[in-house]
């Protein structure tokens, strides 16, 4: 399991890619973002669409030269904060992006790097959007500056193939709510749940976990995208039942598949 990079004294991080694309998941689906994909994750979800995050650290980073060009430069890893900001600024100059998606892997493994990066983003006119597996509560609590947006996953054992993470998810949600505060919370924080055919009991449990903090937090149910020998997509009837179960305790439950897959986007 990858350990958190809490002492990134050099201000560097191992980055997989930086590119301009369309957000394909959650309540901001469809907006244009700059994506900063950081290496490393301690989980092994069966449906993972970025398995390279668990392999050998990449020697080079894929960096798109201009927004939408798909022309790639390959600078060596690790990258400094200044190098990342320069790459992000070039993409932002070519198109008015909504925000910078901090994704992975698990970005919170690089908390010290994020502490140096996040304060510099307002100068680029880019809010920060953290995509996280929702298990690193201590790192969330210790961030020097909270992200502008958080998209937190709840990982269901019925589709991950791993043990349930209910305690870490509960702790993370509490930390995120504390850091963001009550004002505008339901715009800034969302919970995403990937689910399959056998996930109904898990979805009911997850919904109760969310409702213990805020019934009106946006909850996005995401039917799993089949990959290799991973879990199969849920049936249409299961999708309807999953939404019914979650909506029994939550007031904002949406079913949104991975639209970037349908669009052929990265």
Image: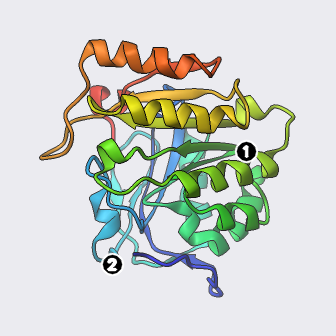
Note whether 51 is above or below 40 in the view shown: above
Numbered disc 2: secondary structure: loop
Q: Is residue 205 toward the left or the right of residue 196 in the image?
A: right
Give the quarter of the figure containing the N terminus: bottom left
Rendered image quadrant of residue 53: bottom left
Q: In this view, does 50 lie to the left or right of 143?
A: left
Which dot marks residue 227?
A: none
- Where the C terminus falls, by quadrant? top left
Q: Which mark is residue 148?
A: 1
**Residue shown at 62% from the left, 86% from the top:** 10
Q: What is the x, y in percent for residue 55?
A: 28, 72
| Residue 247 falls in image quadrant | top right
Q: Estimate the x, y position of residue 15 in percent, counting from the top left.
A: 45, 67
Asked if 155 appears above or below 259 in the picture, the reply is: below
**Circle 2 residue:** 59
Q: Residue at x 30, y 34 (%)?
A: 224
Disc 2/disc 1 C-alpha distance (Å): 30 Å
Q: Where is residue 2 in the image (x, y as percent from the top left)?
A: 43, 76
| Rendered residue at 65%/87% (across/down) | 9
Depth check: give the residue in front, 60 or 206. 206
Looking at the image, do the residues carrying marks 2 and 1 touch, with CB atoms under 8 Å apart? no
Whether residue 110 sits left or right of residue 160 in the image: it is: right
**Picture residue at 56% right of the left edge, 28% below the top:** 219
Q: Can residue 44 be seen in this view?
A: yes
Q: How crowded is mark 1: few (under 14 residues within 10 Å), some or many (20 or more)?
A: some
- Tell me if 234 is positioned left or right of 115 in this view: left
Q: Which of marks 2 and 1 is nearer the N terminus?
A: 2
């Amino acid at each position: 399991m990858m350990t958190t990079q809490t002492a990134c004294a050099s201000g560097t991080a191992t980055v997989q890619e930086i590119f301009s694309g369309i957000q394909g998941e959650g309540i901001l689906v469809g907006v244009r973002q700059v994506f900063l994909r950081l290496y490393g994750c301690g989980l092994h979800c069966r449906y993972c669409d970025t398995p390279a995050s668990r392999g050998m650290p990449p020697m080079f980073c894929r960096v798109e030269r201009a927004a939408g060009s798909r022309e790639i430069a390959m600078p060596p890893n690790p990258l400094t904060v200044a190098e990342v900001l320069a790459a992000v600024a070039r993409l932002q100059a070519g198109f008015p992006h909504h925000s910078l998606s901090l994704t992975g892997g698990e970005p919170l493994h690089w908390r010290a790097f994020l502490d140096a990066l996040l304060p510099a983003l307002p100068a680029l006119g880019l809010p920060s959007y953290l995509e996280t597996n929702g298990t690193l509560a201590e790192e969330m609590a210790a961030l020097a500056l909270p992200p502008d947006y958080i998209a937190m996953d709840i990982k269901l054992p019925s589709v991950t193939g791993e043990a349930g993470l209910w305690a870490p998810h509960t702790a993370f949600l509490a930390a995120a709510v504390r850091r963001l505060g009550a004002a505008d919370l339901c715009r800034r924080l969302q919970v995403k749940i990937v689910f399959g055919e056998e996930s109904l009991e898990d979805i009911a449990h997850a919904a109760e976990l969310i409702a213990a903090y805020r019934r009106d937090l946006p909850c996005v149910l995401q039917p799993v995208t089949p990959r290799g020998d991973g879990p199969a997509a849920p049936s249409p009837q299961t999708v309807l039942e999953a939404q019914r179960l979650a909506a029994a305790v939550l007031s904002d439950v949406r079913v949104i598949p991975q639209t970037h897959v349908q669009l052929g986007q990265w």
